[in-house]
Every structure is written in C-alpha cells, then in structure tokens.
C-alpha cells in the first residue's frame, strides 16, 4: 500500500482498528494478572494533524464533536485518548501510545518496527511519553509474534501490517496461525485492508479457514465504503487496487469488547461514510461451537 503514516494517520481504518484496540485492552485490564502486549508494526507513535487534506478529516475528524460522542458512547475509551486543543484536534496517537495508556504497573508492552527511521522516531516518542514498561525494537514483528510462547503473563498482540509487499497476506496468515496455536489464551487483533483484486481477493476467508482448521475461535469485522474510503490523492504512490474499507480479525478478545464494538458499528459506519457512496459493515464468526 506504500503506507505513508503521516498522511493516513487518523483515517477511517485507524478509527476502526484503534477503537477495537482500546475496547479490548479496557476489558483485558479489568482482570487481575499481568499482560504482556506486543505491537508488531508499531510505526512512529505520534502524528501531527496539520494537513487539511489528510485522511484524518475523513476519520477521527468526524468523530470529535459532542453530538458524535453522545450517539456512540462506546467510543469514549478511544476518543478520550486523542489530544485536542479546545475543539481542534492537533495530534493523533498511534497504537503504541494508545496501548500504553491502558498499561497497569504490572503490564509491559513490546513495540516492533523494522523501518529504522520510524523506529528511531518511535523511540523518541516512547522516551518522552512512556516509561520502562515499554520496549522498542528495530526488528521484524512477524518473527516476534511467531516466536511467542506461553508465559505467566497473559498475552495480547496487535498485528497491523502496512501491506506494502505482495507476500504480506502469506506472512500474516503464517504468523497469526502459529501464534494462536503456540499460545493458548492469546488475545490477538489483526488488521487488513478490504481491496479488490490480487493479492487480496479471498485472503480474509482463507485466514479464517486456517484458524478454524486449528480449532481457534475467531471473529471477523469489516467496515466498507463501496466507492473507496476517501478520494485518491495523486501526489502519493499508487497502491495496488482501490481501498474499499478495512477489516479486523479477533482471536481470544473478551466478548464484552466485541459487543461494544458491534453496538457502535452501525452509527460509526454512517459517520465515516462518504455521502456519495454510503457504507456497510459486517461481522462473521469462525470456529465457534
């Protein structure tokens, strides 16, 4: 996708993903026992919302009003963590800072980012805003995910690939399937783009079947806009296919978090839809008896 974090930060895909992240961690941290969280594609951590044409105007920018908050109270655990100056949004926290906000004294968070420049910026952000419970590694997050082993702490993983490489789906499927089997009880959230054509067609269904074959309970949520989430911008590298929306795989995420996300989806899709295209959302289950 040639992902440009600064331009895409706070877009509709981020909203869905980060809302789910916050709802999941809000429920996981209600229970006693330490959590060891892993973010496999952490990015640079914090983004300035100073581009009036940035995708944030189609995402988080539509949700900051009081009326939007009243209609979707389920969004509060997420929206309360997005900083503002009065009514103006100024920065967007990436998944590392959002996850950090939920850490308790006994929890820890590992952040993986293989792009050296982004990893350096992430380290600076963590040094400024976080503490010793957070560790940054300039490394391949897929390998870290696949290497997870059962431990005393409960495991949570966010997998948010940029989908820049043609083999991204293969790596995602292999890492998620392996981690789910190696770590019973793992809570995992994996993001993917909803796009037509190769290499995307049929891949979410294939991952669902792979998890089901391993007897792993899973849930898939998609939120789409028929004409694409936003109008394309010509000065950015072209991505493969048109982005129709985004999806999430859940493994082992508390049912209360899923219920709250499901309650918010109809209004959230309506708020984020482009008027000329409309929007849709769907939930599907696999491996549930």
Image: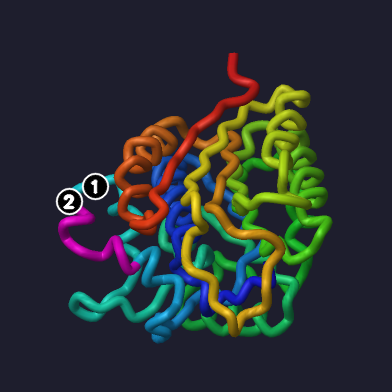
Is the residue under label 1 in contact with that under label 2 (CB below 8 Å)? yes
**Residue 28 drawn above or below residue 141:** above
Residue 53 in the magenta stretch? The answer is: no
Question: Image quadrant for the N terminus?
Answer: bottom right
* Residue 69 picture location, percent across and down: 22, 55
State whether the magenta stretch is mostly helix, strand or loop.
Answer: helix
Indicate the secondary structure of the residue bearing disc 1: helix
Q: Residue at left 58%, top 60%?
A: 109
Q: CA distance from mark 2 to mark 1?
A: 6 Å
Question: What residue did someone put label 1 on?
Answer: 73
Callout 1 environment at 10 Å: few (<14), some (14 to 19), or many (20+)? few
Most foreground residue, 96 or 62: 62
Question: Image quadrant for the C terminus?
Answer: top right
Q: Residue at left 20%, top 64%?
A: 65
Question: What residue did someone put label 2 on?
Answer: 70
Horizontal side of residue 194 vs 265, given as left or right: right
Most foreground residue, 96 or 276: 276
Horizontal side of residue 23 vs 234, given as left or right: left
**Residue 119 drawn above or below residue 78:** below
**Residue 113 drawn above or below residue 174:** below
Can see residue 104? no
* Residue 196 picture location, percent across and down: 66, 50
* Residue 104 picture location, percent across and down: 44, 55
Range of residues picked out in magenta: 61-69
């Amino acid at each position: 996708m040639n992902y440009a974090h600064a331009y895409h930060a706070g877009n509709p895909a981020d909203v869905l993903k980060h809302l789910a992240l916050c709802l999941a961690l809000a429920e996981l941290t209600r229970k006693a026992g330490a959590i060891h969280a892993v973010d496999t594609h952490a990015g640079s951590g914090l983004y300035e919302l100073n581009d009036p044409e940035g995708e944030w105007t189609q995402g988080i920018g539509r949700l900051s009003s009081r009326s939007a908050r009243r209609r979707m109270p389920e969004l509060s655990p997420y929206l309360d963590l997005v900083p503002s100056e009065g009514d103006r949004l100024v920065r967007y926290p990436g998944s590392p800072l959002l996850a950090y906000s939920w850490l308790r004294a006994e929890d820890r968070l590992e952040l993986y980012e293989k792009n050296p420049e982004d990893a350096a910026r992430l380290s600076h952000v963590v040094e400024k805003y976080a503490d010793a419970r957070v560790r940054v590694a300039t490394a391949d997050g897929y390998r870290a995910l696949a290497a997870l082993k059962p431990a005393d702490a409960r495991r949570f993983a966010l997998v948010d690939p940029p989908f820049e490489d043609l083999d991204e789906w293969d790596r995602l499927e292999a890492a998620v399937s392996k981690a789910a089997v190696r770590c019973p009880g793992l809570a995992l959230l994996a993001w993917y783009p909803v796009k037509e054509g190769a290499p995307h067609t049929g891949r979410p269904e294939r991952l669902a079947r792979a998890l089901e074959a391993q007897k792993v309970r899973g849930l898939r949520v998609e939120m789409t806009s028929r004409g694409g989430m936003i109008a394309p911008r010509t000065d950015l590298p072209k991505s493969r296919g048109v982005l129709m929306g985004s999806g999430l795989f859940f493994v082992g995420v508390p049912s209360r978090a899923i219920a709250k996300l499901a309650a918010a989806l109809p209004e959230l899709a309506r708020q984020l839809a482009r008027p000329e295209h409309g929007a849709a959302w769907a939930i599907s289950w696999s491996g549930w008896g």
